[in-house]
Amino acid sequence: MKARLAHDHWSLVVDKPGSSSLADVQEGAFKSVGFQDALTRLEKVTGIEFPAKDREVLKSVAEHRNRVVHFYHHVLDGSDVTLRLEVAKDQCRAWALFRQLLEGPWQLAFPGIASSLDTLHDAFAMNRVYLEAQFERIAGRLRAAIASGGTVEDCSTCGFTSMLIELREFDVRDGTCLVCSAGMRAVQLTCQECQRVFETVPDKSVLGPCGHEIGLEEMCRQLGLDVRRTRNCWTCAPYSGLGSVYVAHDGNRLFCMTCMQAHSPRLQECRSCGANWAGCDDTYVVECPTCRS
């Protein structure tokens, strides 16, 4: 919080602006702003209003921190397990709040920390207490998504009902977990034998819910693709996407069975230099004609 205030002006971290000089601050010979005043200044300086719930969480963390740093906290002896759990939850809730700020409106004030944030988040994501706190935090967003007709399912990684599903072209279900950030992508097919609809990652052949084998030709038929017309995928061809793009029956769309991305055959764009070029109808262009990448 103080670092964000100092980004705008060093005097904002002083308890009483004007009472200390820059030299005092650089030497650490000053009294810094208290928690409540820091919150108030942050709201005025950044224009971001902290809801009452977030204020209480941050206040709780600050108070526990002050007890540990300045004197003694009885929670350290391990006798009060319930209190230790509550402190841990508040710390996790506070981190979820600050991560949202650091990756969003505070991003310009803290440049070059993206990799550090990812490392911290990965560490937190292994902690069940953090995941529970994160689930609490995004509960309203999940309810809003469901109310607007969205689909939310159980996440196979963290176990919470927090996987927000988006339906894309070619019956692709694209999911992102709002708790642990895990992702999933699959197509929907119907088993010819048992007539059940199921999700799967495409391959040369897949097994339906009853064990019936569904071949590539049947998969293409269900997805509306021409199995006879294949191309290389310009997204994943350097890795494993050779010959994995199939042309839709309407001739205006392409679909890669490897990365499950939809493409347009009319115009390609190079991700390196941004150049555009017309796609060839017979041979899918992978190398950019401008920068050759």
Image: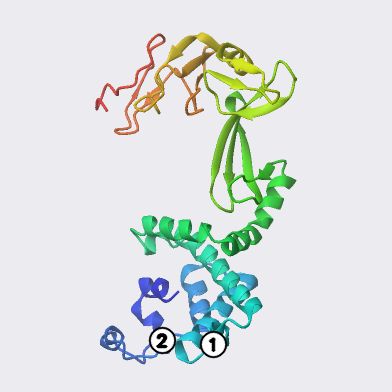
The picture places residue 181, in percent across and down from the top left corner, at: 53, 49
From the viewer's perspective, is 258 left or right of 146? left
Name above or below for residue 68 compared with residue 94: below
- The C terminus: image quadrant: top left
Scheme by which the image is coloured: rainbow
What amino acid is found at the position of numbered circle 2 in the picture?
Ser
Identify the residue at horizontal 62%, vertical 74% (top origin).
86
Q: CA distance from mark 2 to mark 1?
A: 22 Å
Number of numbered discs: 2
The picture places residue 94, in percent across and down from the top left corner, at: 54, 69
Residue 84 is at least partly visible in this image = yes
Identify the residue at horizontal 57%, vertical 72% (top origin).
88
From the viewer's perspective, is 285 left or right of 73? left
Which element is circle 1 on?
loop
Between 137 and 11, the residue placed more toward the observer is 137
The picture places residue 100, in percent across and down from the top left corner, at: 51, 60
Which element is circle 2 on?
loop
Q: Which mark is residue 280?
A: none
Nearer to us of marks 2 and 1 is 1
- The N terminus: image quadrant: bottom left
What amino acid is found at the position of numbered circle 1 in the picture?
His
**Disc 2: which residue:** 32
Residue 34 is at least partly visible in this image = no
Q: Quadrant of residue 59?
A: bottom right
The picture places residue 8, in percent across and down from the top left corner, at: 37, 72
Identify the residue at horizontal 62%, vertical 76% (top origin).
56
**Disc 1: which residue:** 73
Identify the residue at horizontal 31%, vertical 91% (top origin).
29
Q: Quadrant of residue 75?
A: bottom right
